[in-house]
Amino acid sequence: MVNQEELFSALHKMGINFFTGVPDSLLNDFCLYMTKNIPDGQHVMAANEGNAIGIATGHYLATGNIPVVYMQNSGIGNATNPLLSLTHPCVYSIPLILVIGWRGDPAVKDHAQHKKQGELTPVLMEDMDIPYEILDDDNTVIEKFQWAFDTAKTISSPVALIAKKGILTQKEKHQEYPESNLMNREEAISAVIDVLGEDAVYLATTGRATRELHEQLAIHGIDRDIEFLNVGAMGHLSSIGLGIALGTPEKKIVVFDGDAAAVMHMGSMATNGRYRPNNLIHIVLNNGVNESVGGQKSSGQIVDLTAIAKACGYETPLTFIDNKFNLQEMVKNWGDSSQLAFIDVHVRQGIRKDMPKLQIDHKEMKEALCKKLHK
């Protein structure tokens, strides 16, 4: 891994002093350095990657200085619209430096949801007329950032640096979790299953919650044909839940969302509230951080998610829930009534060390769920 202090010192000398984006596991130490050393206002953690492109564009318009936008390559989809219709040379020609974590790199074994994105990452840059270099050697990282800065300035449009594993983060993450008396995600999931049992369909958000739901159904002795694990498509889980709820009004649908995921595409909450299916409960497992990519602070416990949900049309408690008793009471009340419901559950960070890795066949899981729902 490149020395982050030396890298950021070099970036400062180039005149690069504004950073925005969405954290990524392959950029973990790069992101953590910014969190600890770059003041708020110079480092802006965005809701999604398109949001970050807009923020960076505004910074350039205000200052004339070239900003950095960081993301995982899964976020290229969110960024594509503003990259093509805002910053592209055919439109406003805005110089940016994109730093992209290369999940699904064809040279590295990775999960199924990253495979195609990894294959297409360089292709997408070429198709969007974005010159790029690959960060694959610690000794050339600063040199390639200098290339990116010079090129973006010369052509007045975005350029990209695609980071391979181990360049902007350590090969193994070492996360420390603060002590807390709150439930963790798994305990909250278990508490809900205790109330609803096999009389519901359960959906889990991108990240560690998928492993935890998968494990808890087994612990409860419940067939896993009532689960949907959203291993990719971060931020879209409640939309999937809405589609299922509208299509199977006789089924109870439980969405276990994440705080950063819920914020990423918060507009879906307004859509859910507009159509208001009475068989959907949207539960945010809110630990206030982007845990699976390094623990950078999210907006989850800074903004009032309950008030937002209420304004969108959900039935909600007065504020967030932070204990098992109140969570189960809220879920039981929802199960006995007919209303679109939302619960913001504050949980502690961390996952138990002996949590099994997720080993599933995605298509088999889909077919099992479809068979269950189509009965």
Image (tube, helix red, strand yellow):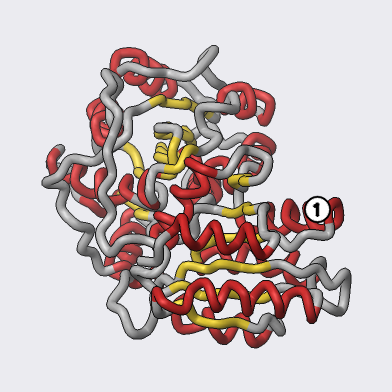
Q: Which residue is drawn at 40% across and 32% down?
A: 287
x then y, percent, for residue 278: 53, 32
| Residue 90 appears anywhere in the view | yes
Q: Which residue is drawn at 51% across and 38% down?
A: 298
Where is the C terminus found, in terms of image quarters? bottom left
Name above or below for residue 310 compared with residue 105.
Answer: above
Q: How many marks?
A: 1
Name above or below for residue 197 compared with residue 17.
Answer: above
| 292 sits left or right of 24 in the view | left
Name above or below for residue 106 compared with residue 247.
Answer: below
Q: Residue at x 68, y 69 (%)?
A: 80
x then y, percent, for residue 22: 54, 53
x then y, percent, for residue 200: 34, 39
Residue beneath disc 1: 58
| 83 sits left or right of 21 in the view | right
Name above or below for residue 261 compared with residue 280.
Answer: below
| Residue 265 appears anywhere in the view | no
| 154 sits left or right of 223 in the view | right
Q: Which residue is drawn at 63% across and 62% down?
A: 78
In the image, what residue type sits under mark 1? Answer: Gly
Name the residue nearer the viewer: 323 or 227: 323
x then y, percent, for residue 257: 44, 41
Name the residue nearer the viewer: 364 or 269: 269
Q: What element carries label 1?
A: helix
Name the residue nearer the viewer: 363 or 321: 321
